[in-house]
Each structure stands twice: as structure tokens, then as C-alpha cells.
Image (cartoon, rainbow, N blue to C red):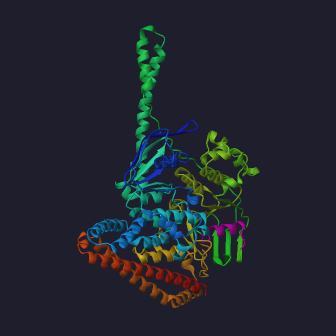
Amino acid sequence: MLSCSDVGVTFGGRELFSGVTLRIPRDNRIALVGGNGAGKTTLLKVLLGELEPDQGTVTRPKDLRVGFLPQDVVDAVGTSGSVLAHVLEGASHITALEDELRELETRLASTSGDEQEQLLSTYGWVQERFQSLGGYELETEAHRVLAGLGFAPDDAFRDTSELSGGWRVRVALARLLLAKPDVLVLDEPTNHLDLDTITWLEGKLRELPGGLLLVSHDRDFIDATADTIIELAAGTATSYDVRTGTVVAELGGFESFVLQREEKLASLRAAKSQQDRMLAQQERFVERFRYKASKARQVQSRIKQLEKVERIEIPDEKTVKAKFAFPDPPRAGRVVAELEGVRVAYGDTMVLADVDLVIERGRKVALIGPNGAGKTTLLRLLTGELAPNEGTVTLGSNVSAAVVDQHQAEIMDPDRTVLAEFRTALSDQHRALNHRSMLGAFGFPGDLAERQIVELSGGERTRLGLAKAMVSPVNLLLLDEPTNHLDLASRDVLEDAIRAYPGTVLLITHDRHVIRSSADAIVEVGEGEARWFDGSLEELLLRREPPVSAGVQGSAEVRARAGAGGQKGDRSPAAAPTSRRPPPDGRSDTATASKGGKRQAAERRNARHRATKDLKRQVERLERDLGRVEGEVAELNRRLADPATYEDQERVRELVDQHAQAKDRAAELLASWEQTQLALEEAEASAAEG
């Protein structure tokens, strides 16, 4: 068990935290939360031995296997070697057992008598250990994990140097998931993942046999994975059990944490109020009789008592409870932006195909879809930074736009103060506003407004960029992944600000809570399309196909959804040119589709069916065959794990040979399945183009 006792860390004379005591059992799931700068990542490094604490002790058993995914993991992924090879290296403790089995098999063939019996005994023990760790299904499991994280079948054999930073993070995560360490430590694992992949990861983490310690600001992700929430605030850590209770059952674990924290804070406030009254009484006595000789002994006694009192501190929640009052932007026309027949390709890769989209004044629209599907491309089209290959992009009458993205720090002067940088966004008519009150609403009250930009964290710069955009004289706000690096309190600020903003908002985010709290419409981007949906995220997800069962069939479906949908900028297939546009009254486009559009869609579906039916049958046959052979491997595993098997040496040799042959057949079938699945995806894409 990984644990620490009374741990404290001080940086530059500032005490980051102290007295932190944690226990991370191998069967517990823990979420570590807290504001930016509270010391969450520092605490992880202390637990992992990367940083020595200034006080306290850390206990890490020698045989404890710990897997760690840091925020800056990109450089840890090699720039040479295949994706699959890098992932399999994470399970080196399992592949080492396989090498040992092969060596024992070779030695068994050339020995006899007592020596052979001893080798058979060793072989049985190693084989049982290898099987218990899933060694016989290791490569198959690696492919399944990669599929769940959005990789297409042939991506497993790509060189890691070809991947972008976000996809290399996924490779590192796949490696850890395959390794199944005793304790898995993840620092902001969802930053580079899309909604479907986050949902898959939640299920995968629930299946892992070991302990889990994660840092996250995603409420839904914490709800789905954590049994315990530990809050690092006011220099100490407080643990909350969120596994059981009525609130957990009805509202989720995170809401249970919030309610428990409020109850604890209420108790602390009451205790502190009582303590303050007692201290004030003692201090009045000391001041009154300090210079009376007859009371000197009593005065000194009370002074010593005051020095020994452990003062009750109320944790600083850093939650901004401000009302937003934005200046009214110039009034735009009813239609703020319109895309007609827009096609965008990067080289041979078609990202958007014949997209039609209308955004009306005042709407708060969330753009969702796999990474690389074209969400940021849509925003770049609206700002004029990118021109379409075909079609037109038109901004409405009197429309002006501002962008908030992950590159805010690059366009800010590091030597300016927060207040000075904020004022650069104000027009002359807005300079009479109370600038400090507005900055306070975005988490920069009082002296924090005088800090220099260079001193701000990534999350603080994002908040400042959001403040600048929302007070500038624009009426169309484009937000590209603004939640990355934002803590929970800052995400609350974002949600409140979007709801209060009087203009139109297009928001790209993978945070389901932010979408749920701030968006009144959703545009789903993928397979070249941009599909409008009037309704909540939950309603949209309910309309999707239900999840399939686990196994090879499940992997195929995941790959078809996550891998073939153009989630990477360098491999998105062309997609069906479908017209999608919300009608003027705001209703769903599905309800108003023309008969001609329906007929064209039906013709495309029929063409796709004719072009792919044989490949689909072949994929299904290979999946059945692979399932049967994997069943044979499992049965041979069971028989080889039976101690009674080793009483017959000849039978052992036969089973070992049968197992090797079955494993080879399984590998061949898996390779055939991957090739056929890829051919099916290409055929579907070609049929869609036609």
C-alpha cells in the first residue's frame, strides 16, 4: 500500500501544504481535487519519490508496481518504434515470463528424469503466473485498449514519431492500462481525450484490479471513477467517502463530496466562532490585568494557554460568487453565421464535406466530436483564418468575433499586470466600467489584479483571456477547449459567464458538466458532417446506438465509431455530403428534412450496404473464428494450470504444443480481422463519397 504520513512541502518560504496523511489501498479509487496552485501535482511527485518532502514520511513497498501518467507525458513517449511495441513494453513483467516459458520449453525437450520433473514444476508455476496476468491474451488486449482510445487497427504499426502530442499521450495511457500496475496515478488524464474516449476510459478504470489515484477537474469523470475524494485546500488534505449514501445514489459522488464539504465547513465555522469568543475573552483579561502585580501569575498562565491553542482555520474555497454584468455588445442580425456547402481538406484528407450550418443570435452552442474531426476547423472558418476549399462562410450583419483558445499566453505581454492586460480589450465606451469588479468576477480580486502575467498559471491565463473576450465589443464568442488547465472553481466561473454573456457563443469542450450547464444546442462534428441538435447532451447520447458487449466485436464497433470517424487530422476519410442546418424557428433539422434529402440519404445507405455487405460477413466470420480459437486457448490455459496435468510428462508436451499452435492461429485470425476491418472502413468511406 502506498501511503504518506504528516507530509509537508515548502517552496520559496511559502508552505504549500503540511500534515498531509494519505493511504492508497490497492483496491480503492481516489480523486485528488483542489484549486490551481494548491499542490496536487507536487503531492503526486512526493508519493512517487520524485520529490522529497520537507517533513513527514512516505511508504512505498519495494514490490509495489506504480504507473504514472504526468501532464507533460509527451516527451516520455519514444519517437521511434511502433505504437504497439511501445504499449507492450509497459507489460514487460509479463513478456519476461513468456520468455522464461519459451526457455523452459527448450530445456524440457533435452532433459529427462529428476531434472525434467523439476523443470516441469517450475514451468507449471511460471505458466500459472503468466496466465493469471493475462499473458496469453496480452497482444489482443493491447489492440483492444488502443481501439478504445480511438486508434484505428493499422495505427498499431505506425511509428510513434508520426503522432501528434495528443495521440502520443494516448499511447502512454494505453501502455499504463495494459501494464495494470498495483497503483495507477493519473494527472489530468482527460485533457487530450474526446467524449467517447473519456466514456470508454471510465469503464476501463472501473475494471482495473489495482488502486487508482487521479487528479481531475472533470466532475462527471470523478463521479464515474472515484470511491473517495480528497481535497487539497488551505495547506491540508481532507478525505470524503463518496461510495455510498442517498446523495450518491441520486446525484452522484461529486455532489456528495460538495454536500459533505459544506457540512464540514459549517461545523468548522461554528467551532471557530466559539473559539474566537474564548480567545477574545482571554485576551481581554490579559490586557486588563497585564500590569497588576497581584494578577501577574494569572496573566502569565493565560498567555501560555493562548500560545498552546491550535487555531481553527477555515479552508479557502476560492469559489467566485459574483454576478456578471457584461457591457451590451453591438446587436447583430438574426443570423450570426452561415456555412453553405463548405468543404475543407488538408491534403488528401477531407475533414468537412458539404457542411451547411446556421447559427442564430443569442444561441449558446457546444461543438462536440472526436479529436481532429473538424471542430477547430469550423472556428477558424468563422474567424477568417481559414478559407474553405469549396462553399461559402458568411458572418451576419454587424457581427464581430473573438477567440479564446489554449494559446492565450502567446498573445499576452508577460510584463504587464493582470489589470493592464485586461484594459487592452476595452473600447472607449467601456473604460468607465469598474474594471476591478469585473476582474474579481473572473477570480482576480484585490491585489491579484496587480500580479504580472508571467506569474500566472495556465488556468489563470485562460480565465484572463475569457474576461478580455467577454468585455470586448464583440457579439460572437468562440471558445476552443477553454476548460483545459481550469480548476473546478474556474470552471464554475466559465459556466456562469457563458450563461450571463449577452452575445452568441460557440464552445468546444469535452467537459460534459460544462456542456450541460451552459449550452442550449449541440453541433456534433464527425465523418465530414456538422449535425445540429436542439436538446441536452443526455438526450443526444440516448439517441445513439447502445454500447455493444465486450470482446472482439466490441473492439470492432469502438474502432468503427472512434477510429473511422476522422478523429485525426492526418487520416480522416471522406464522408457523406449531408446537408445539416437548423430551421429558423430553432427546431431540429431532422424534423424538417426535405423528401429529396431523405431519398438521397436512402440511396446512399443502399449503396453503402451493397458495397460493404460481403466485407461485413467476412468480418463477422473472422470474429466467430477468433472467438472459438480464443476459447480453445483459454481451455488449454486451464488445463496447463492444473497441477495434476504435470503427473503425465508426455501429456504436458502435447498440451504445450497444442497451446502454441492455438496461439499462432489466434494471432493469424486477429491479423486477418484487422485487415478486413480496415478494408470495410475504406469501402464504407468510398460508398459515402459516391
* Relative image position of residue 205 (x, y in whole percent): 42, 62
**Is residue 466 among the parts visible in the rendering?**
yes
Residue found at the very far top of the displayed protein = 293
Q: Does residue 222 lie above or below 278 as drawn?
A: below
* Relative image position of residue 517 (x, y in whole percent): 52, 59
Q: Is residue 375 magenta?
A: yes
Where the C terminus falls, by quadrant? bottom right
Q: Quadrant of residue 622?
A: bottom left
Q: What residue span does the magenta drawing correspond to?
A: 372-387
Q: Quadrant of residue 432?
A: top right
Judge from the rendering whether residue 232 lies leftward or rightward of residue 75; answer left or right. left
Q: Nearer the viewer, residue 346 or 114?
A: 114
Q: Nearer the viewer, residue 557 or 323?
A: 557
* Relative image position of residue 280 (x, y in whole percent): 46, 24
* Relative image position of residue 247 (x, y in whole percent): 37, 54
**Is residue 203 among the parts visible in the rendering?**
no
Q: How many marks?
A: 0
Judge from the rendering whether residue 151 lies leftward or rightward of residue 651; answer left or right. right
Q: Is residue 297 magenta?
A: no
Q: Does residue 660 lie above or below 217 as drawn?
A: below
Judge from the rendering whether residue 130 lies leftward or rightward of residue 370; answer left or right. left
Name the residue rendered at 37%, 65% in the picture: 133
Q: Does residue 556 lie above or below 119 as drawn?
A: below
Q: Nearer the viewer, residue 643 or 668?
A: 643
